[in-house]
Image (cartoon, grey):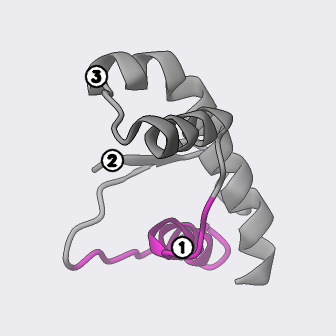
């Protein structure tokens, strides 16, 4: 998985993260290491949720019909920008709590 951060806290340039079993951040003071860790932590917390309108429609369809057919490639092509914005908004909202 690749995560790109930009304009978040002390991170002003675009930073690409590829989290693994062991990920080490190094660098000078006030360069964004802690902020990057907060972002990763918030992303992987199960309670960090953002409700998307399309997800509510799919849930309702599942409830009514008992199943949902979801072609993943078309789904992500159609909803990628919405997903990206929702995740970014959720992170910005949650980071002050961390």
- The mark lying in front, picked from 3 and 2, is 3
Q: Is residue 20 left or right of residue 15?
A: left
Q: In this view, does 20 lie above or below 57?
A: below
Query: Upstream in the sequence, badge 3 or badge 1?
Result: 1
Residue at the image point whose x is 62% and y is 71% from the top:
35
Task: Give the residues in magenta.
Answer: 22-49
In terms of image quadrants, where is residue 55?
Answer: top right
In terms of image quadrants, where is residue 84?
Answer: top right
Q: Name the residue under label 3.
A: 71
Q: Mark 2 points at which residue?
A: 2
- The mark lying in front, picked from 3 and 1, is 3
Q: In this view, does 76 lie to the left or right of 46?
A: left
Marks 2 & 1, CB-CB < 8 Å contact: no
Residue at the image point whose x is 28% and y is 22% from the top:
71
Q: Point out the residue furthest to the bottom here.
A: 98
- As drawn, the label of residue 57 is none
**SS category of the residue bearing label 2:** loop
- The mark lying in front, picked from 2 and 1, is 2
State the CA–CA distance, disc 3 to disc 2: 22 Å
Count of numbered circles on the image: 3
Query: Upstream in the sequence, badge 3 or badge 2?
Result: 2
Query: Upstream in the sequence, badge 2 or badge 1?
Result: 2
Q: Is residue 10 above or below residue 26?
A: above
Asked whether residue 7 appears in the rendered view, the answer is: no
Q: Where is residue 5 in the image (x, y as percent from the top left)?
A: 55, 49
State the CA–CA distance, disc 3 to disc 1: 37 Å
Q: In this view, does 47 lie to the left or right of 77?
A: right
Residue at the image point whose x is 58% and y is 25% from the top:
81
């Amino acid at each position: 998985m690749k995560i790109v951060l930009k304009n978040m806290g002390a991170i002003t340039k675009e930073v690409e993260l590829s989290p693994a079993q062991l990920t080490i951040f190094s660098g000078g003071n006030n360069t964004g290491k802690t902020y990057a860790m907060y972002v990763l932590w918030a992303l992987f917390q199960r309670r960090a949720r953002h409700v998307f309108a399309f997800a509510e429609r799919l849930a309702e369809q599942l409830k009514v019909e008992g199943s949902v057919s979801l072609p993943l490639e078309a789904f992500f092509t159609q909803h990628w920008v919405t997903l990206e914005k929702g995740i970014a908004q959720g992170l910005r909202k949650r980071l002050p709590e961390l």
